[in-house]
Amino acid sequence: MGEGKGRGQISSIEALPDEADLAVAWAAQELRERKRTAVDIHAEFNHKLADLGLEPISSSAFGRHSMAMAQIARRIEDTRAITQTLTERLEPGQTDDLTIMVAETIKTLVFELLNKHGEAGLTPKDAMEMASALKSAVNAQKVSSDRRRAVEADLAKKVDAVLDKVSTEKGLPATIVAQLRKEFFGMK
């Protein structure tokens, strides 16, 4: 028995062969830019398909596809706006935590998809996209960690310089300076 709603029948655009990928990507980009009408884009898209020796896509199929792409684009823009709002309100350490959380979520989704559909249900393109998403998530975590280490190292240098200056000018004993470093920053 099925598990809830299925994927349904694939669209005529999804059924196009790999050589049409550039034309599909071109049409999606044109639709996103919203500088031309969908009718014009559809006509040029079919012309590109004809140049590849492929049958044209009906206006209704193209319309359904463009509506689906518009919904995805809106969700991405909404997510981007939410993320921007969150990151503006967070301290540097908290944005690193957010990056790590998102990266872990992506990893979990990839593994859940693999477990749910198994290798048999994946096309090579699906596998490549999931590997790319996983790689991007891991890289984001690394960049976030590297940035955090750089900020901490910079802070440590500044604290070191201030403590050295204060100890010299105010005559603080080296033991007190060492204790301050240890207590406040876990340094040296």
Image (cartoon, rainbow, N blue to C red):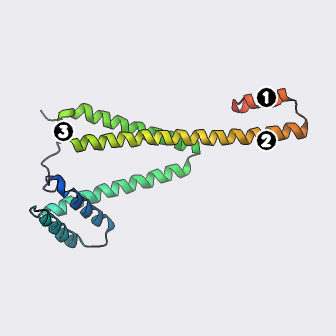
Badge 2 amino acid: Val
Viewer-nearest of labels 3 and 2? 2
Q: Quadrant of the C terminus?
A: top right
Badge 1 amino acid: Ala
Whether residue 3 is visible here, answered yes or no, is no
Badge 3 amino acid: Gly
Q: Would you name the residue on which mark 2 appears?
A: 162
Q: Would you name the residue on which mark 3 appears?
A: 4
Q: Is residue 48 above or below residue 148?
A: below
Query: Where does the image place residue 113, in percent across and percent down from the top left?
Result: 27, 36
Residue 149: quadrant of the picture = top right
The residue lying at 50 percent from left, 42 percent from top is 143
Query: Where does the image place residue 7, in percent across and percent down from the top left?
Result: 17, 45
What is the spatial separation of the Cα atoms under label 2 and label 1, in whole angstroms? 13 Å
Residue 171: quadrant of the picture = top right
The one nearer the camera, 83 or 40, is 40
Crowd rating for badge 3 (residues with CA inside 10 Å; few <14, some 14–19, many 20+): few
Q: Would you name the residue on which mark 1 appears?
A: 178
Crowd rating for badge 1 (residues with CA inside 10 Å; few <14, some 14–19, many 20+): some
- Is residue 90 shown left or right of residue 20? right
The one nearer the camera, 167 or 53, is 53
